[in-house]
Image (cartoon, helix red, strand yellow):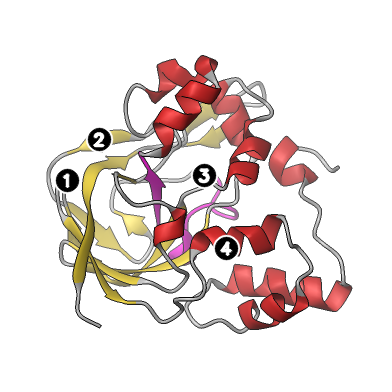
């Protein structure tokens, strides 16, 4: 396919873990700040950016998190208490803040060029309880999941540098039937659609974790427990 510019990097952000919430859990969700100069990108994401829990966050399959800035206005309108933290990008702990690109516009496995890097969309973000602590709104993780305003993660195919203002160019779309919005419907609404799960379990470009989730649902004919992820405790 012919490469096309689909958006630009409005803001590039990095952070370091700080204690979060009453249990002082290490997290960078509240610390990511804008940087304007070129940032080196390695296999695990932006050099200088850190995550608090390397078992759940970060790593090659969740190297760079993009959150659509378009969602900020909707959150502020629906949840006015969130507005003060939405005054600047980075409120959701994202590395890339981008306008004009949302979940319906991207697909699992999309390969993009940003600066001198090549990235691939590996999976959507699975909202967790830390969002609720960050905004002082315990129900927020479930609202994020319900609305589908989750953002997504890229893996790094080619390391390089990224800077604010860089165009995001779509190089390849191997899975055009798997836009992220419809994928989220499978994950959270039509949760046991066996035909779609069978495809997702083998889908090239999707993260191993996402493919494993689909395979487990097929094997168990049941949906995994969301309680600990969303609420911080078993359901």
Discs 2, 1 touching: Cβ within 8 Å: yes
Which quadrant, please, contains the N terminus?
bottom left
Which quadrant, please, contains the C terminus?
top right
Q: Is residue 63 found inside the magenta-colored segment of the image?
A: yes
Discs 4, 2 touching: Cβ within 8 Å: no
For mark 2, give the secondary structure.
strand
Q: CA distance from mark 3 to mark 2?
A: 21 Å
Asked whether 59 or 91 is in front, the reply is 91
* Residue on which the image places disc 4: 182
Of callouts 2 and 1, the N-terminal one: 2
Question: Which of labels 3 and 1 is toward the front?
Answer: 3
For mark 1, give the secondary structure.
loop
Q: Relative to 20, say whether 163 is above or below.
A: below
Give the image quarter of residue 168: bottom left
Q: Relative to 111, say whether 143 is above or below.
A: above
Q: Residues within 10 Å of mark 1 (few under 14, many from 20)?
A: many
Of callouts 1 and 4, the N-terminal one: 1
Q: Relative to 40, say whether 127 is above or below.
A: above
The residues colored magenta run 52-69
Of callouts 4 and 2, the N-terminal one: 2
**Residue at 46 percent of width and 55 percent of height:** 103
Of callouts 4 and 3, the N-terminal one: 3
């Amino acid at each position: 396919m012919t490469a096309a510019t689909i958006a630009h990097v409005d803001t590039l952000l990095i952070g370091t873990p700080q204690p979060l919430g009453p249990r002082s859990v290490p997290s960078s969700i509240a610390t990511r700040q804008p940087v304007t100069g070129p940032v080196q990108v390695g296999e695990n994401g932006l050099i200088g950016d850190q995550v608090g829990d390397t078992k759940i966050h970060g790593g090659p399959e969740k190297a760079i998190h993009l959150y659509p800035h378009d969602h900020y206005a909707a959150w502020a309108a629906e949840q006015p208490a969130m507005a003060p933290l939405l005054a600047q990008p980075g409120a959701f702990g994202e590395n890339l803040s981008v306008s004009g690109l949302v979940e319906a516009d991207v697909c699992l496995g999309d390969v993009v060029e940003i600066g001198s890097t090549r990235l691939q969309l590996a999976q959507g973000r699975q909202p967790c309880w830390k969002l609720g602590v960050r905004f002082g709104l315990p129900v927020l993780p479930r609202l994020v999941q319900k609305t589908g305003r989750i953002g997504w993660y890229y893996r790094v195919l080619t390391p390089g540098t990224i800077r604010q203002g860089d165009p995001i160019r779509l190089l390849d779309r191997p899975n055009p039937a798997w836009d992220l919005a419809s994928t989220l419907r499978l994950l959270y609404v039509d949760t046991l659609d066996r035909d779609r799960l069978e495809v997702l379990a083998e889908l090239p470009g999707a993260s191993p974790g996402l493919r494993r989730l689909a395979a487990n649902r097929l094997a168990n004919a049941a949906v995994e427990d969301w309680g600990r992820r969303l609420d911080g405790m078993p359901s």
